[in-house]
Image: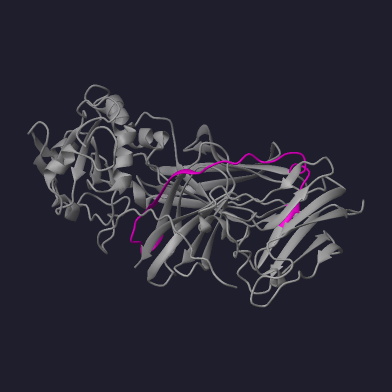
């Protein structure tokens, strides 16, 4: 088929060198000194550590957008108010501009069109309470390979750069409390790559690794993890060992098979013998059911209808309805091009789960149409009450990228399941907000920091410069901070794709 130019909205966290950040649990290799840009007082990080303080260093560059976003959030001001000299006096915070190619006085401005600058709290426009200095030499001491970098250094010099931890705990308050305050409640930074999907007959969940990181000074010698299905305890997984500050461990939960709707929860129930109730994962495996026996199917072609076909099957594979071809020309166009067809379909009482399979013989999907003039191509389903089970939705008709997402409009085969829940209502269109990826360039692990205000189903994948999917990274439905292994990708330019049914956002990164 004729191809549209793939338009890309690129967002990149800026990278620096090929060196790696200091590893979690290592110690500060050398002292960091300088002069506070606002007050002129001497800065001596080692002196703070010797005085028993935990030191937080926010390493930034004045041109770095993600750095500014974190500064503008006021999060470090909140930490300083609680744990700084006017609070418990356990912490010293240092803002560190470390790019030797930028003038120090650029900290007195910002290039992001917002009030304030690097020296003030953007909300109050008053001077920040913690120290700030320009000292590029410190980037060597801290092995800075990307901005922003955020270090927590304990009084004994043991440290962690939060971007190297997964999930990234940059805005995780229990993690900060446990890292700073010896009297804080027990807490482990946990990660679980569990994916539950809707199913027809049964859902099989593979054995899963639960990783954890200890933010506190107290070694973790024992912990207990629990797995709960529909409110009933189905597995208890113990841990025995010794995990020091900023070090990591893991346990494995068993594989599971579900044949009915199942709400699965994984949690941490104790640390070093102290009972706690810390959620790790919660999700639902929903068994599909037919919500309507009579449905209206509407299918819209693009400019190459001759390449498109679709079929409706039930859980046994029996074909209930099919359109094997549409009338068109090999060069594009034809009688059925850019048209909408409607079909009345009756589902037998014996069928319990339905699948629409759409095929494109060329393999590039329904991509040839003019969004400004034509209705979006694809399949749509209404139940017998006129409620939408599935609708085509392209929020910005000028954004061709939003209609090329694999599994929605760009496919070799796309599947749409009809469930009872979907047959009675239309899911509200939601948006994904505040996406950041780092480090960039990346060598091994690329971290996605994504915030969404309400539950939004989305997939994460990597595409190459030609728009081809080269790595599938999973499906999610809430805010996420997660590291993905991209070490096997060849060197080059790629895009991290975050795709909902309504949108397709691309974030450019370099693999080195």
Viewer-proximal residue, 328 or 321?
Answer: 328
Which residue is most to the right?
A: 349
Q: Would residue 45 be seen by someone viewing this image from the given angle?
A: no
Q: Quadrant of the C terminus?
A: bottom left
User: Which portion, as a residue range, is magenta?
Assistant: 416-445
**Who's the residue at 63% across and 39% down the image?**
428
Q: How many marks?
A: 0
**Image quarter of residue 357:** bottom right
Q: Would residue 351 be seen by someone viewing this image from the given angle?
A: yes
Q: Is residue 87 above or below residue 197?
A: above
Viewer-proximal residue, 328 or 384?
Answer: 328
- Is residue 361 rendered magenta in the image? no
Viewer-proximal residue, 334 or 306?
Answer: 334
Q: On the rendered structure, is 446 left or right of 54?
A: right
Q: Main secondary structure of the magenta part?
A: loop
Q: On the rendered structure, is 321 left or right of 140?
A: right
**Who's the residue at 77% across and 43% down the image?**
423
Q: On the rendered structure, is 321 left or right of 89?
A: right
- Is residue 441 rendered magenta in the image? yes
Q: Is residue 127 above or below residue 483?
A: above
Horizontal and vertical percent position of residue 496: 46, 58
Q: How is the image coloured?
A: one colour
Q: Quadrant of the N terminus?
A: bottom right
**Who's the residue at 78% across and 43% down the image?**
420
Horizontal and vertical percent position of residue 221: 44, 44
Horizontal and vertical percent position of residue 443: 36, 64
**Image quarter of residue 365:** bottom right
């Amino acid at each position: 088929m004729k191809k549209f130019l793939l338009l890309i909205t690129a967002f990149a966290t800026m990278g620096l060198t090929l060196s790696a950040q200091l590893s979690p649990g290592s110690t500060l290799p050398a002292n960091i000194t300088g002069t506070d840009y606002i007050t002129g007082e001497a800065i001596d990080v080692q002196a703070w550590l010797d005085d028993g303080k935990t030191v937080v260093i926010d390493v930034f560059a004045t041109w770095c957008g993600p750095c500014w976003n974190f500064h503008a959030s006021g999060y470090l001001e909140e930490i300083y108010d609680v744990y700084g000299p006017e609070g418990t006096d356990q912490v010293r915070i240092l803002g560190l501009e470390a790019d030797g190619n930028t003038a120090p006085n650029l900290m007195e401005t910002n290039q992001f069109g917002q009030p304030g600058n690097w020296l003030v709290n953007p909300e109050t426009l008053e001077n920040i309470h913690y120290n700030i200095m320009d000292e590029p030499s410190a980037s060597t001491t801290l092995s800075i390979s990307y901005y922003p970098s955020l270090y927590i250094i304990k009084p004994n010099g043991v440290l962690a750069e939060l971007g190297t931890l997964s999930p990234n705990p940059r805005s995780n308050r229990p993690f900060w409390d446990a890292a700073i305050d010896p009297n804080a409640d027990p807490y482990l930074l946990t990660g679980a790559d569990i994916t539950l999907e809707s199913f027809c007959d049964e859902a099989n969940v593979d054995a899963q690794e639960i990783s954890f990181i200890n933010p506190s000074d107290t070694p973790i010698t024992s912990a207990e993890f629990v797995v709960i299905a529909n409110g009933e305890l189905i597995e208890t997984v113990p841990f025995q060992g010794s995990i020091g500050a900023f070090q990591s461990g893991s346990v494995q939960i068993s594989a599971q098979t579900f044949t009915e709707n199942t709400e699965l929860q994984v949690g941490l129930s104790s640390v070093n013998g102290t009972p706690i109730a810390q959620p790790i994962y919660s999700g639902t495996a929903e068994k599909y059911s037919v919500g309507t026996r009579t449905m209206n199917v509407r299918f819209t072609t693009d400019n190459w209808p001759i390449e498109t076909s679709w079929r409706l099957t039930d859980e046994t594979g029996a074909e209930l309805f099919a359109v094997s071809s549409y009338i068109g020309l090999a060069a594009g166009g034809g009688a059925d091009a850019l048209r909408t067809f409607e079909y009345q379909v009756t589902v037998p009482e014996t069928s319990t789960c339905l699948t629409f399979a759409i095929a494109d013989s060329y393999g590039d999907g329904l991509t040839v149409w003019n969004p400004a003039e034509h209705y979006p191509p694809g399949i749509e389903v209404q139940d017998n009450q006129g409620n939408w089970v599935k609708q085509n939705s392209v929020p910005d008709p000028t954004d061709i990228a939003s209609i090329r997402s694999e599994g929605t409009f760009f496919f070799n085969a796309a599947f749409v399941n009809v469930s009872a829940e979907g047959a009675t209502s239309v899911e509200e269109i939601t948006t994904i907000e505040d996406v950041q990826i780092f480090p960039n360039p990346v060598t091994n692990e690329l971290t996605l920091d994504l915030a969404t205000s309400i539950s939004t189903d989305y997939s994460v994948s990597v595409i190459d410069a030609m728009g081809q999917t080269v790595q599938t990274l999973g499906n999610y439905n809430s805010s996420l901070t997660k590291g993905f292994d991209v070490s096997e990708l060849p060197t080059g330019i790629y895009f991290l794709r975050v795709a909902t049914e309504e949108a397709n956002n691309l974030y450019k990164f370099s693999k080195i």
